[in-house]
Image: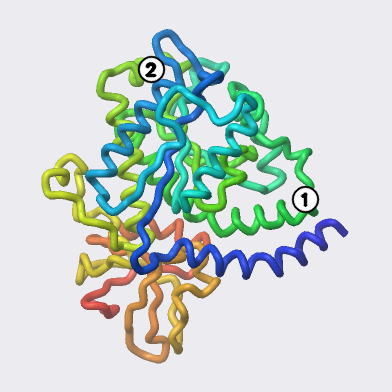
Amino acid sequence: MRNLIIALMLSVILPVAANAAGVENVASEGRKRVVVIDPGHGGPRPGKVMKDIAEEDYVLDVSKEVRKQLKTKLSDLEVYLTRSSDSAYHEKQSEDNKRRAEFANRKGADLYVSIHANAHEKTTVNGCEVWVLTLNERLMNQNQGQAARYADDGDFIDPKDIDRTSQGFMMAVARQLENEPFSRFFAEECCRNMSSYGLKNLGVKAGPVFTVLYYFEGPGVIVELAYLTNSEDYAYLSKKESKKEMATAISDAIVSYFKALDGNVAETPVESVAEDSVTEDDVLTAAGSEALTEGYTIQLISSTTEVDKNDYQFKSYKGRVSLYMGTGRYKYKYCYGCYASREAAQEELARARETFKDAYVVRFKDGNIVTK
């Protein structure tokens, strides 16, 4: 009976939430994009402390460097930090995390990035990873213990304490279903970027109900830079250039995220292009596909009639679907991504087929699908 009640409530809530989130996730005229960076811990909670590295100080330095880089890379982006000194919002950790999320809500953040360093009882565990919120009961319980080993008390909401029939939980589920594709997109970009500096890529993870993500109303992640308890990771984090490299990995992922979201972000100054290592094989956004007049894209569906690009079936790619014209009865082609080579498009095809099983790579030229 409880599952039936939840299903019925979701059938009412999800369409409303999807429409509301769509307004937030699709670019609106004259509205600046906003990102909130949360340097984890601070104040009475230093986080992990290993030898010469205290997590609270390290992630604050990285966060400030992310903000500095973004001012150069995306001049139109508004960037806020939840803290800029060794401080906290509240002496109680659960309340502190909640207030950080509420700060991001007040700022109208399009993306929320909480930055941490990791630790594990097994010193052989190493690598970078990014966590996203899940409200799947099996995953919540499965990963609760794993992620909580070195967490501060109050970092998580115990799944047993969540009233799954409450309206608040129903709304949280609706938000999570709408935001998770966006969170995962950023998380995957961030993992790839961090691992390019030699860290092991542990990938995107979902499990515990992080307090700092549960109360945020948009796409959000927790970035775990590396394991302070591992000798190799610690050696990397101790290097002089590591803070700037980690900041570059995160800021580049933020740039990719907003380009993929609406494709009309401010251009990167010429002097910064070499540092960003932009190549023509990088994914361009569907919305910004005018950057390439010819190339490859992933066809999600075709239709005999025109379909709203914000239709609910595109919820996983909201704001990132482009319409190309083809021939024949099914001439309306709805596609994702813009790639300079077929090989680059093929790399993303498997992910697209998780939602659209018949998706495939096609060639386009001047807004039309072509066969040669």
Residue 284 lies, in percent from the top left, at: 28, 59
Left or right: 197, with 114 as reference point: left
Q: Residue at x 35, y 39 (%)?
A: 250
Closer to the camera, 82 or 46?
82
Q: In the image, residue 168 lies at what x, y percent?
A: 71, 53
How far apart marks 1 and 2 lie (CA) works out to 42 Å
Q: Secondary structure at mark 2?
A: helix
- Residue 164, numbered label: 1
Q: Is residue 184 visible in the rendered structure shown here? A: no
Residue type of the residue flagged with mark 1: Arg
The secondary structure type at the circle numbered 1 is loop
Q: Which mark is residue 341?
A: none
Q: Nearer the viewer, mark 1 or mark 2?
A: 1
Which residue corresponds to the image point at 77% horizontal and 50% vertical from the top-left? 164
Disc 2: CA contacts within 10 A as few (<14), some (14-19) or many (>=20): some
Residue 245 visible to an observer of this rendering? yes
- Quadrant of the rendering where the C terminus is positioned: bottom left
Q: Position of residue 141 (x, y in %)?
A: 71, 37
Q: Which residue is mark 2?
A: 232
Q: Nearer the viewer, residue 366 or 350?
A: 366
Name the quadrant containing residue 200.
Answer: top left
- The amino acid marked with disc number 2 is Glu
